[in-house]
């Protein structure tokens, strides 16, 4: 590695070269930290778009959390079950790829959930069942094709590419499992919470006029205006 060159003067140039596992790991970590700034900016932009689409900050943060959670879960399967202890730099790129794939699955399910509200506005179980039937099959097809495409990298003779295929293919499958289990549960809980909140607000709004009338201080009732037929005489005005 040639980090930088320094000119000492008189045409003398000093070049620093280094090697070794520790030096290489340091360079990789520096590169990953630099990429994280771009990843954070991309995640912020994605979160803003999700808030605009779902119209809920809670659901958007929860959905993005489900997608990101798939990365450490896959790492556990990769190292604990597959017994692969080599973590290539390409494996960290998988985090950027899965954000796009996972958020797309979230949009598919959330759109199906909103469409189910028109068919089953009062039956939560039927609404969830319709959303599952409409969205899971579409997500499963894209998940299988994406995972198969990444698993084909296992045929490569390059170690870094081969382990990336294993890691990325497993990541896509685990992300699908989280999106179809954890995210729907969060959607249902958010729906119940928002419904109770709306009902309490409506109840307060309905009770406010009645309470307002009860709190009005009593005033003397105005005297009724006399009727002409109640005045003795022919009812004609006196001149």
Image: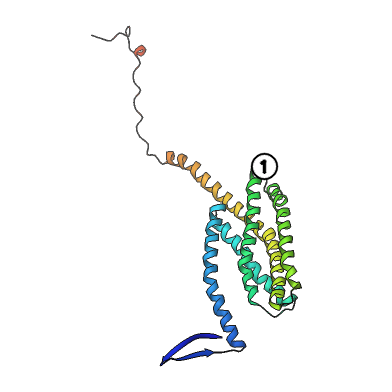
Q: Position of residue 202 (x, y in %)?
A: 52, 44
Give whichever of 226, 4 is nearer the camera.
4
What residue occupies the far left of the structure in this picture? 239
| x, y percent for residue 238 | 25, 9
SS category of the residue bearing label 1: helix
List the single residue furthest toward the top: 234
**How is colour applied across the structure in the image?**
rainbow
Quadrant holding the N terminus: bottom right
Check the image and report above or below for 76 versus 125.
below
Seen in the picture, residue 90 relative to 236 is either above or below; the reply is below
Q: Is residue 220 left or right of residue 195?
A: left
Q: Classify the position of the C terminus by image quarter.
A: top left
Mark 1 residue crowding within 10 angstroms, few (<14) / some (14–19) / many (20+): few
Between residues 41 and 180, which one lies in front from this camera angle? 41
Indicate the position of residue 41 as horizontal and vertical percent values. Answer: 51, 66
Vertical arrangement, residue 129 with respect to residue 92, above or below: above
Residue 173 found in image quarter: bottom right
Image quadrant of residue 163?
Answer: bottom right
Residue projecting furthest to the front: 11
Q: Which residue is mark 1?
A: 119
Query: Going by the picture, which residue comes out furthest to the right?
Result: 155
Q: Residue at x 72, y 73 (%)?
A: 77
Picture residue at 55% right of the left edge, 68% below the top: 39
Using the image as rendered, state which of residue 156 and residue 74 is in the foreground: 156
Q: For residue 67, which quarter of the picture?
A: bottom right
Please name whichever residue, 63 or 13, is drawn nearer the observer in this view of the structure: 13
Name the residue: 70% across, 56% down.
139
Where does the image place residue 190, in percent across and percent down from the top left? 60, 55
Look at 56% across and 89% down and name the residue there: 18
On screen, residue 82 versus residue 44, left or right, reads: right
């Amino acid at each position: 590695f040639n980090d930088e060159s320094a000119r000492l003067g008189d045409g003398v140039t000093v070049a620093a070269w280094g090697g070794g596992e520790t030096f290489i790991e340091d360079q990789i970590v520096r590169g990953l930290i630099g990429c994280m700034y771009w990843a954070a900016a991309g995640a912020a932009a994605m979160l803003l778009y999700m808030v605009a689409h779902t119209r809920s900050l809670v659901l958007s943060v929860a959905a993005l959390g489900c997608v990101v959670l798939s990365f450490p879960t896959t790492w556990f399967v990769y190292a604990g079950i597959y017994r692969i202890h080599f973590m290539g730099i390409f494996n960290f790129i998988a985090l950027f790829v899965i954000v796009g794939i996972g958020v797309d699955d979230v949009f598919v399910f959330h759109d199906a959930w909103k469409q189910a509200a028109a068919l089953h506005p009062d039956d939560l179980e039927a609404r969830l069942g319709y959303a599952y039937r409409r969205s899971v099959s579409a997500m499963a097809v894209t998940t299988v094709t994406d995972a198969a495409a990444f698993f084909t990298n296992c045929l490569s003779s390059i170690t870094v590419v081969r382990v990336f295929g294993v890691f990325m293919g497993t990541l896509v499958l685990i992300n699908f499992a989280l999106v179809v289990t954890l995210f729907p549960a969060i959607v249902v809980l958010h729906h119940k919470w928002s419904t109770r909140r709306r009902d309490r607000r409506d109840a307060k709004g309905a009770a406010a006029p009645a309470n307002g009338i009860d709190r009005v201080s009593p005033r003397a009732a105005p005297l009724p205006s006399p009727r002409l037929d109640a005045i003795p005489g022919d009812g004609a005005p006196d001149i």
